[in-house]
Structure formats: structure tokens, C-alpha cells
Image (tube, coloured by chain):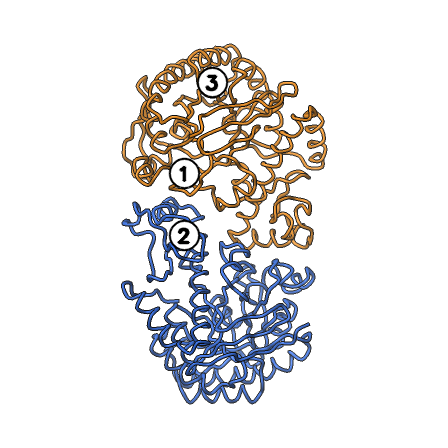
Chain colours: A orange, B blue
């Protein structure tokens, strides 16, 4: 059993390249983690997720605790065996989805109570239960339960949620003492767009001590500028020796910005969600394959892509699949986008190692320049 | 350019094993041809269709002539290049879908006029146009335009449609003289459940002369017993030296019955349609993966299957995917079913070659016996 560890291999300015070791294998950072909400990456076979270059995927505790149930997953051998993904898995705490999906939620010091969106049952999620569920699921990296506030918000609301998240962080850490050896727990920085609150949260979490630190409460309605500012101010307040994870972010441009500011890990539904809706991420910028001018275009999306689907199918055929309502179109574009995100991160890792990350970002943005307006995550 | 040809390799009673040569490769018979209605097998990547063992797929002329359009497909290099399937392709004539899908259809001696279900435009499909469209698509095997009558039907209706189909067969053959070398045209036997009409149709088509002969107008509401009777009486009336194709059939049991009666080719949406609906075809009979008792079942569908998805995922996980509404479930079961159909045909070919087809059928049915009630195609 490998213990969890993080090795910093290279830095370039604030940007970092490293390697996380987990019981189920290595994660190269900066890392993009595809989202397998219900123990499946939507519309994409695990083999394609892996071939795209993903070292680790994220699964959602909220969904899995409701269906098929954490105890059932544990009885079936844990999440890795249940879903047939023998590589690293990170789980969130469930808190974010409770806030965004569950009706009738009530937050108290003890935890969150909510009505299941599946069968209407009342469910309690305390810091202790969030950890117990993640231990049952068997993820390599678990997240603390936190409260995330949508921006913009009043300072006293942000401060209250940040304070509650810190107290829950301590309870999560205690609860995690029961976790099998090798597994890791990350704390989550809150504090909205308030620099002082963010720094307080970051230092307090570091004082408690976690295997890694996430920045939560972003990609919840703020501008890209606010996101850059918060990440740029928060990352330096986090311990250098542990990985830093920016939750729920984001567009390719967001990823480049955040890596520049010292972030090591990302998760986002964007490559698969946009893929299902006909938007391909490519070296040449985003391409909406549903646009009529693709109907007669024999060219592939990117003849030099590492992704077979980007090379082997014409834009005309991909366009046809979307127009005809064939699910294969969404699958192919999701796969193409997963490759693109992984290649973007692989390029970042190589550039950081070579001390030329700024050039990499400039060249990547230049290639995108003909296209603009990345959709929001 | 390979000319179209059929080589009979072995017979066992009326059952036949053979090999069809086409410009795009060999088709081993008895052959099951997965249905790629709109130039895509629903929810399944071409690579998986091929890996399952498919030598040839069927595409629907009706759908493709309406969207993306036959002239567009031709301009994009033909169907093989358009969809990225470099292996043999058969197209139907469009007639069957006109009857079943198009509103406001009108049949005259000249052909069929119908309203497109996509944009409401009035479209004419004559025997000549049906062949022209299939030549534009570039399929290796084209089908004559015919009129198919739903059973049960009055004898005079069946007789009228059979007579019209024969006259259209002659016109299709003339129109097909313009096809590039190597391509094949099949005639279609009609005649409903009337033995005399079927035999008349079969002999008249043989008199016109085609590269192969299909039995149409089955799997349209009749019982399995009627289907067996019609196939058993019609097949002997068809030329021995050409392939025989039973259109739109069927269940695994139907396939075994029809092979026994001398059929060489099949197409059916059943493996993919039922896969999307949670029904897996296996050596142990059909399994409805949505049934609650699979929720805790660690076993794969078939540990000894040639199909990775049947081996590598537990029934509990497949069940979860369906319960959670994850499209991956339908994809995996479709792939599993395509493998099963191909393996069933591979087993039939081997058994016929070994002169033990009756044993093969008996053993296969015995293994299914614990489960019954194959769904209808």
C-alpha cells in the first residue's frame, strides 16, 4: 500500500509540476480530473477516459450515497472495484451538491439535512457522515464537508460559512482518523471574494493539517477576473509541500490562469457537458460542430490530435451525428474534449519542467485567438 | 476492385456456411448485420461494432436520403468514407421506412410519394431514384424498392403488393446497370404468408436475376411459427448459388431457425434497441439488468464472454448505470449484445462446417432454457 505523498518536481514562477502518489497509482500534476458524478463519466467508456490521459477521476459523494448507496458500494468491494476503474479516485464531500440540487436543505452547526431528489427521503449529512461515506466508497482522496456560498454574497454570510467550514474541517479530520492507511483528506478554503477571509481560512486549515488543500466556492457565478484574483491571493497562503486543488474549474483558459498561480489539480464537467452539446475544444479554439457550415467539411477536427476521434471522423460526419440526434456524436466530442484537457495539462507540465510556462500559455492562447468566448463552466 | 461473389463453403441439411466478397471486403455467412440507421450504430462506436465481429453493417436509405442527403454523402466521398467504416455496407431501398415512418405516403405504379418526417417536404421515391440514391451512397449491396404489407392482410392486398414489387424489381435492375463495377443488387421476395405467392415471387425474381435474394415482409406482426413456415417454404425456391437475406429478423431464436432453413444474412435493431432498454442477450438467455435482484450481484454477465464489457463490469454496476440514467449502460449492453449476436453466428458457421448444426442449436437452446420469452424484434 502506497502512502499518500506529493513530490514537487519543478516550479516556474508560481507554477508547479509534481506527482501525487496514492494507493491506486500516480497522479501527474497539474492534473485535470474528469467528473464521474454517478460512478460513470457521462457517455464515455472508462477505457477512453484512461486513454485520454486521465490519472484520476472525481466521483460525487452526494449522488453515490443516495444511489446506489455507500454501504452497497462498500459491500461490492468499494468504488474502484464497483465501477471498474482501478486507478486513483477523488470524492467530494457531497456538500456542494446538497446546496445546489437538494430541496428543503437546512444547515446547522451539526451538519446539513436535505430531502433526497431521488426518493424524497430526509437525509442527514454531518462532517462525520461525509467522511464515513467517503471511507465506505474507498476513494484515494476525500474532501472535508464545507459550506459554499454563491457569489456575489454579503460579507457576513461569507464569513459565517467560512467559519462553519473551518469547524467542520476539524471534525472531518478527527473522523478521518478511522480511514485505512494511505488515504488522504483535503481541507477546503472558503471566504468568497474576500482576501482577508480567504487568507484566514487557508492558514487555519494549514494549522489543522491536511494532505492537500482545495479552494472552494469559486466557479459559482463570479467573473474570471475575480476568480484569478482570489486564486492568486489564496494559493500563496497554502502550504508549499501539499497539492492545491481548485474545485469545479473550469475552461481551458481558467486552467492556464490557475496553473500560473500555483494550482495543481482541477475537476470540471465542462469537457463532457459541452461535448454532449456539440462544442469541441481544440488547439484552434472552441468549435461548435452544430453550425451549418460544418455540414460539407471533410476535414477532421484536428488531423494532428492524439485523439483518434479528432483525426478519424470528418467535421461533416460529427455535424451529421448531432443533427440526427445520434448519441455517438456527444460521446465522440466528449472523448475529444477529454483528450484536449489532458493534453493541455501535459503541455503545462512539460513547459513548467522546461521553465517556459509563460511561453506555453502565450502560444496556446495565440492558437486560440481566432476563436473566443469559451463557455462558462 | 473485387467483384461481388458468393462462395458456398459448407452445407448441413438446408443450413449453409459461405463467404460473400464485396469491394470492401469479405462477409462470412451466416452473417448478422448491425443496423446503422443514420450512418451510426446507435450509441456504439464503429470500433466496437467491428471488434464484436461484424463484417458488414446496414444503413437506411430513407434516413440518409433525407439527412444528410445522398448527394451530400456522395460529395463527401460516399458512405464508407463519410462514416469512417471502410468495411462492407448494405443499404435498404428506403421503401420499408417510407411505409412505417412517413406521413402522407401515396403508392402508385410509378413509385412512392411521401412527406419527410424531418422537414415536411414532399419526396418522391421511384425504383429508379431508390437505386440512384444507393449508388450515390456507395453501398456494396443495394436493395430493390418493394412494397411490404403488414400481416395479417387480405390475399388480394398481398398479391397486389407482390406484383408491384416484381415490376419494380425489373426497373431497379435496369437502373442498376449504371452502378460502378463490383456492386451488388438484391431482389426482395414478397407474398405475405401465402406459399403460392411467395414461390411465384421467388421464381420470378430468379428469372430477372440478382446478385442475391431477400425475403421481405416478415417480422411485421406475424407469429414465429408463420415466419418459420414462410422461410422454410421460400428459401428452397431461391437460387442455391446466391446469398439469401431475411430482412429485419430477429431474435437469437429466429436466427437459429432461419439458418436451419437456408438463410445466409440477417439485420435487426434488436441487439442495440434492447441493449438501450436494459436487456442483455447472453449464453444463459436474456437478462433484464434493470431487475432489482441485480443491484448487489458482483458477477459479470458472462465471465467467459469474448466481450470485455460482459467480463469486466459487474451486474450490480450495469444495473446502477440504468437506474441512474447513465447512457454508458445502454452503450455497454448494446456492445455486449452485438458480440452475442456475432458469436451466435460464428458458432453457427463453425457448426455447419463441422456438420453438426442441429447439435449446436440444441445445445444453445438448452443453455437458454432457464430463461424464456425472447422479446420480439
Q: Quadrant of the N terminus of chain A?
A: top left
* Marks 3/2 same chain: no
Mark sitting earlier along the chain (1/3): 1
Q: Which residue is mark 2?
A: B311
Question: Residue A14 location in percent, x, y?
Answer: 62, 18
| Residue A201 vertical placement versus B84 (above, below) | above
Residue at 69% over, 26% down? A354
Tell me where residue A317 appears, x and y as whole percent: 62, 54
Q: Chain of mark 2?
A: B
The mark total stands at 3
Task: Provide the chain ID for the residue under circle 3.
Answer: A
Disc 2 crowd, CA 10 A, few/some/many (<14, 14-19, 20+)? some
Instruction: Check residue A80 in the rendering and tell me which mark sits there, or answer none.
Output: 1
In the image, A334 versus A23, the foreground residue is: A23
Residue under circle 3?
Answer: A189
Sort mark 3 into few (<14), some (14-19) or many (20+) by Cα contacts within 10 Å: many
Inter-mark Cα distance, 1 to 3: 28 Å
Left or right of A283? Residue B309 is left
Q: For marks 2 and 1, give the CA distance.
A: 16 Å
Rendered location of residue A150, percent (x, y): 46, 23
Residue B190 spot, x, y in % from top left: 47, 81
Residue B191 sits in which quadrant? bottom left
* Chain under disc 1: A
Horizontally, residue B116 falls left or right of residue B277, namely right
What secondary structure is marked by label 1?
A: helix
Would you identify the image quadrant in which residue B220 lies?
Answer: bottom left
Towards the viewer: B159 or A181: A181
**Label pair 1/3, CB-CB below 8 angstroms:** no
Amino acid at each position: 500500500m502506497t502512502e499518500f505523498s506529493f513530490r514537487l518536481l519543478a516550479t516556474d514562477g508560481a507554477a508547479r509540476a509534481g506527482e501525487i502518489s496514492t494507493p491506486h497509482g500516480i497522479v501527474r500534476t497539474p492534473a485535470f480530473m474528469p467528473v464521474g458524478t454517478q460512478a460513470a463519466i457521462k457517455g464515455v467508456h472508462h477505457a477512453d477516459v484512461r486513454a485520454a490521459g486521465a490519472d484520476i477521476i472525481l466521483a460525487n459523494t452526494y449522488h453515490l450515497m443516495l444511489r446506489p448507496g455507500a454501504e452497497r458500494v462498500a459491500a461490492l468491494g468499494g468504488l474502484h472495484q464497483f465501477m471498474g476503474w482501478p486507478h486513483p479516485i477523488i470524492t467530494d464531500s457531497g456538500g456542494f451538491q446538497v446546496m445546489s440540487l437538494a430541496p428543503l436543505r437546512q444547515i446547522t452547526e451539526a451538519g446539513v439535512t436535505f430531502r433526497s431528489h431521488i426518493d424524497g427521503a430526509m437525509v442527514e449529512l454531518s462532517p462525520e457522515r461525509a467522511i464515513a461515506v467517503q471511507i465506505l466508497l474507498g476513494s484515494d482522496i476525500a474532501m472535508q464537508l464545507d459550506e459554499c456560498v454563491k457569489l456575489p454574497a454579503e460579507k457576513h454570510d461569507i464569513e459565517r460559512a467560512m467559519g462553519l467550514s473551518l469547524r467542520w474541517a476539524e471534525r472531518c479530520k478527527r473522523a478521518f482518523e478511522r480511514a485505512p492507511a494511505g488515504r488522504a483528506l483535503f481541507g477546503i478554503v472558503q471566504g468568497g471574494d474576500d482576501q482577508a477571509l480567504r487568507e484566514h481560512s487557508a492558514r487555519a486549515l494549514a494549522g489543522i493539517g491536511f494532505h492537500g488543500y482545495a479552494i472552494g466556492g469559486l466557479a459559482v457565478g463570479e467573473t474570471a477576473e475575480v476568480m484569478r484574483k482570489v486564486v492568486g491571493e489564496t494559493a500563496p497562503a497554502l502550504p508549499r509541500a501539499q497539492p492545491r486543488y481548485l474545485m469545479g474549474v473550469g475552461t481551458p483558459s481558467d486552467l492556464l490562469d490557475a496553473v500560473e498561480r500555483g494550482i495543481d489539480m482541477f475537476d470540471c464537467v465542462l469537457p463532457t457537458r459541452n461535448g454532449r452539446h456539440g462544442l469541441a475544444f481544440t488547439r484552434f479554439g472552441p468549435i461548435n460542430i452544430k453550425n451549418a457550415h460544418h455540414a460539407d467539411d471533410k476535414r477532421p477536427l484536428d488531423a494532428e490530435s492524439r485523439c483518434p476521434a479528432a483525426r478519424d471522423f470528418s467535421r461533416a460526419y460529427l455535424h451529421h451525428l448531432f443533427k440526427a440526434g445520434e448519441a455517438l456524436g456527444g460521446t465522440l466530442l466528449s472523448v475529444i474534449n477529454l483528450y484536449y484537457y489532458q493534453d493541455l495539462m501535459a503541455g503545462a507540465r512539460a513547459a513548467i519542467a522546461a521553465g517556459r510556462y509563460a511561453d506555453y500559455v502565450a502560444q496556446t492562447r495565440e492558437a486560440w485567438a481566432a476563436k473566443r468566448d469559451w463557455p462558462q463552466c
